[in-house]
Amino acid sequence: MVVALVVALVMKTFLVQVFVIPSGSMEQTIQIGDRVLVDKFTPWFGAEPERGEVVVFKDPGGWLEGAHGSSTDGPVLRAAKQVLTFVGLLPSDSEQDLIKRVIGVGGDTVECCDEQGRVSLNGVPLDEPYLAPGNPPSRQPFKVKVPEGRLWVMGDHRDVSADSRFHMGNPGQGTIPVSGVVGRAFMIAWPPGRVHQLGVPVSLSSVARAPADGGTVPNSAGGGPVPEEPPLVMGVLGILPLIGRRAGRVRP
C-alpha cells in the first residue's frame, strides 16, 4: 500500500496525470466523460506549449467561479480523503484546472474574422477541421497580439467554450501564462472505443512564427454572455495496475 501510494504521488506530480472531462467545450475532439492523459514530464526539460496542442492549465484568475460546498465529513474521513487526494487517488474539490487548444503563442497575432468567417494567425487563415459541427470559428470578433510568455487558447466547441475570447477584460486580457500550464493532453485513454492520440493540426503548426517584440494585446471586440464552464476533474491513475482504479479531477 505504501509503495502504491508513493508511486501514485510521483506519477501525478512529475510524469502523467489523467483528467476527466466534465463539459462539452472541447467537442468533438474530446467528449464529456473522456479520460485524457496529460504529459507533465517534458515541461521539466523546458518544453513549452506549441500551437495546436491541447493543454490543461490553472485558472489564471476569474475563469472559474471556484464555489465549493462545505464538507459534511467527520475529521477522520476528511483526513483520509485529503491524503488520497494529495497522491491523486481521489478527486479534489478544490482543483481549478481547464482544458483548451493553443491557438497563439507569444508574438502571434490572432484575429477573427476574415471575409469567409475564419480565424487568422499572423495573417494566415486557419483551416480548423477540429471544430464541433455547426460551430463557426467565432461569433465574437477580436484581434489580439499575444505577449511573450503567454498563450491564446480556445475550445473546439466554440459556441459553449468560455475561452480567451470571453476573458479579455481579466488580467492578461484573455491570454494565459505559460507558467500556468499543467501539461499537454496527448491521448484519450477512456472509454476503450475512443482511445487515440491527440494530434497537432498542420494548419496551426505550419504557420510561421511572428518576430518577437514583447507583444501587446491591442484591439478587441467582446460581447455577449460568458458561457458557464465547470473545472476539470483531476486524474485517474488507475490505468496502472499497481496503483488502482481511481484518481482525481480536472476542470474543462
Image (cartoon, grey):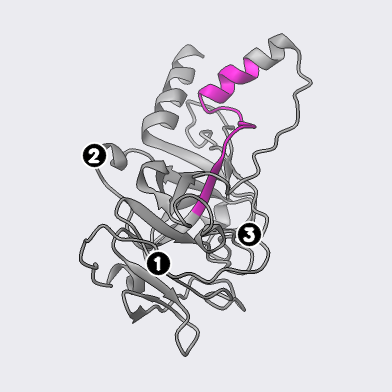
Q: Position of residue 18 (x, y in %)?
A: 50, 40
What kind of residue is marked 3?
Gly
Residue beneath disc 2: 45
Callout 3 crowding tier (Cα within 10 Å): few <14, some 14–19, many ≥20: many
Earlier-in-chain disc, 3 versus 2 = 3
CA–CA distance between discs 3 and 2? 32 Å
Rendering coords of residue 66 (x, y %): 64, 39
Which residue occupies 48% across, 69% down?
Answer: 220
Q: Nearer the viewer, residue 248 or 240?
A: 248
Q: Dot 1: what SS? A: loop
Callout 3–callout 2 Cβ contact below 8 Å? no
User: Farthest bottom residue?
Assistant: 115
Question: How far apart in space, not on screen, are marks 3 and 1 (Cα)?
Answer: 30 Å
Q: Residue furthest top?
A: 76
Q: Which residue is mark 3?
A: 24
Q: Residue at x 56, y 52 (%)?
A: 192
* Rendered image quadrant of residue 214: bottom left
User: Which three-letter amino acid code belongs to the residue tagged 1?
Assistant: Pro
Q: Which residues are magenta?
A: 80-99
Q: Is residue 26 above or below residue 91?
A: below
Would you call the spot at circle 1 few (<14 residues within 10 Å), some (14-19), or many (20 or more)? few
Residue holding disc 1 = 218
Q: Quadrant of residue 25?
A: bottom right
Task: Find residue 105 and report its horizontal and vertical position in percent.
Answer: 33, 59
Give the CA separation, mark 2 to mark 1.
32 Å
Q: Position of residue 166 (x, y in %)?
A: 57, 61
Q: Is residue 229 left or right of residue 103?
A: right
